[in-house]
RNA sequence: GCCGCCAUCGUCUAGUGGCCUAGGACACAUGAUUCUCAUUCAUGAAAUCACGGGUUCAAAUCCCGUUGGCGGUACCA
């Protein structure tokens, strides 16, 4: 049987981070059996439309690499839904009331549907059902009619969707039967919850998927993390590419219980991807990411190897390295944390050593020189290095000192240390 | 309320009757490496498998009930 799946968001705001998983599972299911993956815009609720939503959904899917084979929009098919609603009325399976068309539910017997997720079986007593609207008085279909008509016409199966649709199953089954259409296979996913176990929302720090992009998360990491929130590959691998997921994915192995979204683990995974990336690739990503940022120059490439193991998100790059590109701010209090007496005099000695070094400076030479100097002055090596670090960067934490000094260059380094001496230690 | 689903370390999970005195990952703690931070490595703490009954020689695994959580109950999706 041909497999074709779709991701069907309604354009009522930014694409939610939780939807990434729904889209991903639909994509994986399709690609695993060399089927098609479509994007369908469910814009039948005209009142809730939010401008720019479609663009956000489209660009987010592109960013993630979840490429769809076809894009359809429900409002384009208004006539089709009306035709089928009409047909139901003509056949006596629906009726008009208050300008809307209502489907007549059969209240006898049960509805039994086997779901692809965990092969569980949903059973509903039809006596609990009631008639429902299929075509609203504004002429647009409700979700139920649109789902049945679209997924039949587009030959979608399986239907991969959020769990809130489970209780609508009797409606959908009876609609398919009313049209004498084959009922597709269904796969109802679980809910993704926030840390307090309520539905994941902005309150939990969960944002639109595109906002994660802006915060310096990598699409690979987002995809990988979301995939594991409800699915464990048979291989047990934790880090896997889209292609590897396609190879291993199976809706059968998808979980039955809700999962809590954990930003901390997402960040760990993002860092994992950053560390595994080649320097060239990371440089390229940072360049794209930092477009427009004032402190960024062509020097990024040489900084990347120094910070690769120190950042978890692309945004971390800026606070960690800004002092390389521009003059740092100094705070006299920081110097007090360094356990060296007469810091001004020591710094002066350091300047002397630096000035006598051959130019251009090479990182390799610094370590030996300053270790010896520390010994001469009877200062712990660690404190010596910290003093230089703070004098050059204004920070207690930086990328490796000597490589950083080399990057900043002799002129700037000497200028900074001299500035610190005159400003804070007044040694003339 | 009614209907439906779910229930293993804080979190993501492995586990489909014996291999489980429950394994891995994140986070956490300690130690090693180290110029800071990070990385890496080692070690540790962390789950009476929600609870109560069954079934069985044997249950985290099967059955029933309870409790809890979540979803649905719209001319929203």
Image (cartoon, coloured by chain):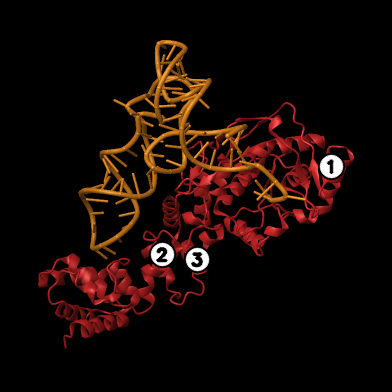
Chain colours: A red, B orange
Residues marked 1 and 3, same chain: yes
Question: Residue A186: image x %, image y %?
Answer: 66, 37
Q: Which mark is residue A184?
A: none
At 75% from the left and 53% from the top, the residue drawn is: A74
| Residue drawn at x 81%, y 53% as measured from the top left | A139
Give percent across and percent down for residue A148: 75, 42
User: What mark, if any, has residue A316 been given in the picture?
Assistant: 2
Residue A347 is left or right of residue A269, and the answer is left
For discs 2 and 1, the disc positioned in front in the rendered view? 1
- Residue A16, percent from left and from top: 57, 54
Give the mark count: 3
Q: State left or right for residue A60 relative to residue A303.
A: right
Residue A154 visible in this rendered orientation of the protein = no
Mark 1: secondary structure: strand
Badge 1 density bin: few <14, some 14–19, many ≥20, Cα 10 Å: many
Q: Residues within 10 Å of mark 2 (few under 14, many from 20)?
A: some
Q: Quadrant of residue A417?
A: bottom left
User: Going from the N terminus, do you reach mark 3 or mark 2 first?
Assistant: 3
Q: Quadrant of the C terminus of chain A?
A: bottom left
Image vertical order of residue A286 relative to residue B2, above or below: below
| Mark 3 → mark 2, Cα distance in angstroms | 16 Å
- Circle 1 residue: A95
Vertical side of B49 occupied by A188: above or below:
below
- Foreground pick, A239 / B33: A239
Q: Which circle's residue, 1 or 3, is located before the other in the chain? A: 1
Residue A322 at x, y percent in the picture: 38, 73
The residues bearing labels 1 and 3 have C-alpha atoms spaced at a distance of 60 Å
Q: Chain of mark 3?
A: A
Chain under callout 1: A
What residue would you read off at disc 3? A284
């Amino acid at each position: 049987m041909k497999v074709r799946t779709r991701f069907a968001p309604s354009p009522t705001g930014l694409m939610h981070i939780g939807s990434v998983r729904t889209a991903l599972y639909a994509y994986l299911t399709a690609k695993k059996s060399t089927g098609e993956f479509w994007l369908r815009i469910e814009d039948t609720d005209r009142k809730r439309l939010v401008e720019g939503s479609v663009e956000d959904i489209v660009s987010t899917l592109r960013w993630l690499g979840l490429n769809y084979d076809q894009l359809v929009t429900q409002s384009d098919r208004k006539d089709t839904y009306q035709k089928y609603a009409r047909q139901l009325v003509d056949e006596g399976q629906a009726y008009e009331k208050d300008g809307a068309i209502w489907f007549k539910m059969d209240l006898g017997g049960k509805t039994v549907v086997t779901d692809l997720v965990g092969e569980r079986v949903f059973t509903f007593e039809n006596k609990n059902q009631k008639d429902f609207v299929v075509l609203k008085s504004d002429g647009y279909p409700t979700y139920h009619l649109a789902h049945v008509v679209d997924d039949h016409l587009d030959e979608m199966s399986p239907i991969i969707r959020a769990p809130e649709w489970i209780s609508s199953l009797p409606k959908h089954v009876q609609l398919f039967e009313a049209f004498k259409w084959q009922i597709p296979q269904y796969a109802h996913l679980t809910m993704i919850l926030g840390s307090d176990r309520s539905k994941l929302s902005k309150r939990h720090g969960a944002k639109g998927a595109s906002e994660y992009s802006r915060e310096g998360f990598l699409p690979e990491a987002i995809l990988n993390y979301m995939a594991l929130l409800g699915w464990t590959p048979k291989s047990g691998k934790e880090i896997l590419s889209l292609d590897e997921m396609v190879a291993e994915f199976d809706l059968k192995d998808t979980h039955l219980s809700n999962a809590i979204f954990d930003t901390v683990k997402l960040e760990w995974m993002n860092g994992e991807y950053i560390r595994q990336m080649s320097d060239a690739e990371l440089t390229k990503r940072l360049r794209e990411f930092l477009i427009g940022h004032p402190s960024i120059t062509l020097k990024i490439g040489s900084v990347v190897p120094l910070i690769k193991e120190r950042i978890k998100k692309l945004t971390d790059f800026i606070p960690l390295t800004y002092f390389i590109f521009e003059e740092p701010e100094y705070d006299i209090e920081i110097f007090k944390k360094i356990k060296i007496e007469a810091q001004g005099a020591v710094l002066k000695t350091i300047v002397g050593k630096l000035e006598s070094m051959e130019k251009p400076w090479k990182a390799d030479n610094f370590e030996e020189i300053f270790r010896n100097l520390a010994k001469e002055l009877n200062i712990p090596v660690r404190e010596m290095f910290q003093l230089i670090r703070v004098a050059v960067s204004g920070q207690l934490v930086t990328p490796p000192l000597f490589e950083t000094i080399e990057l900043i260059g002799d002129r700037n380094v000497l200028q900074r240390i001299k500035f610190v001496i005159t400003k804070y230690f007044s040694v003339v």
